[in-house]
Image: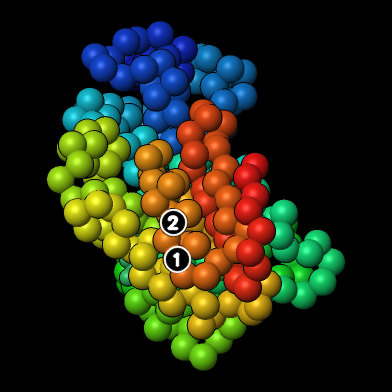
Amino acid sequence: MSLSIHRPTIAQVLHQSYSGVSATDTRMLLQGVLDVGHAHLITHPDQVLTPDQEQKFNSFISRRINGEPIAYLVGEREFYSLRFEVTPAVLIPRLETELLVDQALERIPARGPSKVLDLGTGSGAVAIAIAKHRPFASITAVDFSDGALIIARMNAKYHDATNVCIVAGDWYTGVAGEEFDLIVSNPPYVADGDPHLGQGDLRFEPRTALVAGTDGLDCVRRIIDSAEDHLIRGGWLLLEHGYDQAEACCQLLRGAGFGEVFSCSDLAGVMRVSGGKRGSFLAQSC
Ligand SMILES: C[S@@+](CC[C@H](N)C(=O)[O-])C[C@H]1O[C@@H](n2cnc3c(N)ncnc32)[C@H](O)[C@@H]1O
């Protein structure tokens, strides 16, 4: 008699319920353990897990019950329909950040050369998504975290994003003397002491990727304050920010001399991205 009959099948694992773990999470963890897609689970319900796979799956379930983000457990997350490797060294790319990429792509020529700067690149998700959609653009991606730089470089290599250059730096220090056509950033914007920091995925993500002073705007201020030195005249600065920070961001942009200042809402209807144009003074919204 085969020992394998004591091991669970894919169908048995998927039908079991685990306290506090959704059916979708269970499926994604199993896909991560087996290194297969959703279709494989559907078409191979009788596949028996090996002892190693069963042990790894059980360990993932325990860690998930403890709150660890799915993306860190399986080591990847999809962003802008691209697969990104993630570890606890980087922020898990968010769906709402796709709006920042949309807004950037609208302002980058599809066929001509263009210089783009991504400040606080983390996993490299924003820079690489832009790079793959604008192959004639040169993207410089900056982060001050050594752990993030390693992951961003791995992701750039995985996607063969040869038009992305990943640079170490404290905001603009890595690009001293350089000017860009467009600057994008999803900087840390959570206020120190915000109760959300003790909830959900945020508990496991790097604080340096999340927290920005008492009002959450310290990084936004630093980025806006020095943007003029690194943007061509007519160049755009686009920033993701917190749900209640659009007005403050727009004021900071106007105060720094930006024109055509606007805010945009994400798919959930939350004002999520604000931006402005260097050396232009028309008001706009979208
Ligand atoms: C909110 S995460 C964004 C990551 C990625 N761009 C994304 O959207 O998924 C902010 C990133 O800014 C980086 N960061 C924070 N302070 C920085 C600084 N002073 N200079 C450069 N990068 C910084 C963090 O390491 C982190 O990777």
Answer with left or right where residue 173 lies relative to residue 109.
Answer: left
Q: Residue at x 49, y 74 (%)?
A: 227
Classed neighbour count for the residue bearing mark 1: other residues with Cα under 10 Å, few (<14), some (14–19), many (≥20): few
Residue assigned mark 2: 251
Above or below for 123 versus 51: below
* SS type, badge 2: helix
Q: Which mark is residue 255?
A: 1
Image quarter where ligand 1 lies? bottom left
Query: Residue flagged by tag 1: what amino acid is it?
Result: Gly
Q: Is residue 175 above or below residue 96?
A: below
Distance of label 1 from label 2 (alpha carbons): 6 Å
Dot 2 crowding, Cα within 10 Å, few <14, some 14–19, many 20+: some
Instruction: State which quarter of the image contains the N terminus.
Output: top left
Is residue 145 in view? yes
Rendering coords of residue 263 (x, y %): 55, 46
* Left or right of 182, for residue 124: left
Residue 143, horizontal then vertical, whole percent: 40, 70
The reply to whether the residue tagged 1 has its Cβ within 8 angstroms of ligand 1 is no
Asked whether disc 1 touches disc 2, contact meaning CB atoms under 8 Å apart, the reply is: yes
Residue 73 figure quarter: top left
Residue type beneath disc 2: Gln
